[in-house]
C-alpha cells in the first residue's frame, strides 16, 4: 500500500542535495488516513524499514483550526511505535494527496537571500508557488502556511528552511520537485548549448565545473574583467568571450578573430554553460578547468589584480610561449 511513497522517499532521501540525514519528510493520504514519516527516521531507509506513522489528518486539520495546543498526539492511530514528524500538521493542512518536504540546497541558496522572494518570481516563473517567511518548524510554521494556502499553491518556498511540494500522485509530486530543482540548479543547460552550437564549430565542455562559471553571474563577471595568470593567455587566449545573448555569438566570434587572428577557444554562454572549440587541445581544456577551480575559490567581497594589457600583449607575442604551444598536446 505504501510502496510508491516508500520508493520515492528512499530516492530523494539518498540525494544529499535534497535531504541530509534524518531531515525532510513525506506523506500520503489514502483510505481515510495520512501516512507521514516518523520523527527521527531517515527517508533513505523507506524501502528497508517502515518509517511511516498513520494519523487522522481530518481531525488534525480541525484541531489546528480550533487552535489546539497539541493537535496531533491524540489523533495518532493506536499500536504504533514511533511519533509522527514534527511537520505532521503541515502535511495534514495541505489538500494534496502526496506531500514532499525537502531541504533542497538549490532552494535554500535562494531562500536565505533577503531578495529571495523577488528573485524567485523570475526563477520559478510558470509554477504555482507561494513564499512563507521563516517560522519555527511545527505548529508555528503550519499556522503561517494556513495564511497563504487560500491561493491553492502546489509549492511552498520556506524562507531559511526548504521547500514543500504537493500533488495528487507520487509521480506528479516527483516531477514537480525536479522541475524546481531544474529551474534553480547551477547545472549547465546542455540542450541549449547543443542548439546554439549547431551552426558553429563548437561543442559543450565536458566538465560541469567548467560550465559552472557561466551559470554563476558574479563569478562570470569577475572572470570577464581580465586575465589572472600567464597560462590563461597562452592556452585560452587574451580575453574571455562571454555571450550574453545567443544571437550575438557570430559577432563575438568575428570580432575576436579580427583582434587576435584566431577563433576563441571557449565561449561562456550566460546561464547555459561553456562551448569549446571542436579541435580544442587537451592542455586548453585543462586550463579551463583550472580557471573554474580558481574562480570557485574567490571571495566576491574583495578586489583582484589582473594582468595589464601590456602584460597580456607581451605573452601573446612571446616567442618562448609560442614554441611551447607547438609542442604541447
Image: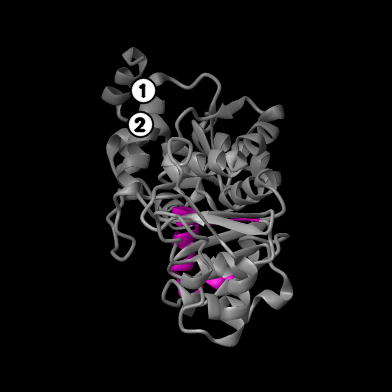
Residue 256 spot, x, y in % from top left: 55, 38
Mark 2 touching mark 1, by CB under 8 A? yes
Query: Badge 1, how many Cα within 10 Å: few under 14, some, many 20+?
Result: some
Residue at the disc numbered 1: 283
Q: Is residue 313 visible?
A: no
Position of 153 relative to 203 (above/below): below
In the orientation shown, which residue stands out farthest toward the bottom? Answer: 67
Position of 174 relative to 127 (above/below): above
Quadrant of the snapshot with the C terminus: top left
Residue 146 spot, x, y in % from top left: 61, 78
Position of 312 relative to 112 (above/below): above
Residue at 28% x, 41% y is: 229
Badge 1 element: helix
Residue 38 spot, x, y in % from top left: 44, 55
Position of 200 relative to 140 (above/below): above
Residue at the disc numbered 2: 287
State left or right for residue 220 relative to residue 156.
left
Q: How is the image coloured?
A: one colour
Magenta stretch contains residue 291: no
Residue 234 spot, x, y in % from top left: 35, 31
Disc number placed over residue 316 in the picture, else none: none
User: Magenta residues, as a range?
Assistant: 98-118
Amino acid at each position: 500500500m505504501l510502496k510508491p511513497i516508500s520508493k520515492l522517499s528512499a530516492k530523494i532521501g539518498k540525494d544529499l542535495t535534497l535531504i541530509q540525514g534524518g531531515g525532510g519528510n513525506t506523506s500520503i493520504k489514502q483510505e481515510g488516513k495520512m501516512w507521514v514519516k516518523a520523527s527521527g527516521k531517515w527517508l533513505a531507509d523507506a524501502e528497508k524499514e517502515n518509517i511511516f506513522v498513520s494519523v487522522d489528518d481530518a481531525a488534525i486539520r480541525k484541531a489546528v483550526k480550533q487552535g489546539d495546543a497539541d493537535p496531533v498526539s491524540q489523533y495518532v492511530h493506536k499500536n504504533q511505535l514511533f511519533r509522527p514528524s514534527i511537520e505532521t500538521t503541515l502535511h495534514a493542512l495541505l489538500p494534496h494527496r502526496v506531500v514532499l518536504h525537502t531541504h533542497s540546497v538549490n532552494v535554500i541558496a535562494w531562500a536565505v537571500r533577503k531578495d529571495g522572494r523577488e528573485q524567485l518570481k523570475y526563477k520559478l516563473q510558470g509554477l504555482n508557488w507561494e513564499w512563507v517567511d521563516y517560522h519555527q518548524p511545527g505548529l508555528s510554521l503550519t499556522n503561517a502556511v494556513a495564511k497563504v494556502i487560500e491561493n491553492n499553491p502546489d509549492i511552498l518556498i520556506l524562507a531559511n528552511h526548504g521547500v514543500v511540494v504537493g500533488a495528487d500522485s507520487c509521480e506528479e509530486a516527483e516531477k514537480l520537485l525536479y522541475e524546481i530543482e531544474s529551474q534553480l540548479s547551477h547545472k549547465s543547460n546542455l540542450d541549449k548549448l547543443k542548439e546554439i552550437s549547431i551552426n558553429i564549430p563548437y561543442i559543450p565542455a565536458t566538465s560541469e565545473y567548467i560550465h559552472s562559471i557561466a551559470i554563476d553571474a558574479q563569478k562570470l563577471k569577475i572572470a570577464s574583467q581580465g586575465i589572472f595568470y600567464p597560462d590563461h593567455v597562452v592556452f585560452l587566449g587574451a580575453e574571455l568571450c562571454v555571450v550574453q545573448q545567443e544571437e550575438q555569438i557570430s559577432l563575438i566570434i568575428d570580432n575576436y578573430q579580427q583582434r587576435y587572428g584566431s577563433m576563441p577557444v571557449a565561449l561562456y554562454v550566460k546561464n547555459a554553460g561553456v562551448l569549446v572549440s571542436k579541435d580544442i587541445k587537451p592542455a586548453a581544456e585543462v586550463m579551463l578547468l583550472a580557471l573554474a577551480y580558481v574562480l570557485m575559490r574567490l571571495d566576491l567581497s574583495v578586489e583582484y589584480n589582473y594582468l595589464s594589457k601590456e602584460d597580456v600583449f607581451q605573452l601573446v607575442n612571446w616567442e618562448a610561449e609560442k614554441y611551447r604551444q607547438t609542442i604541447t598536446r
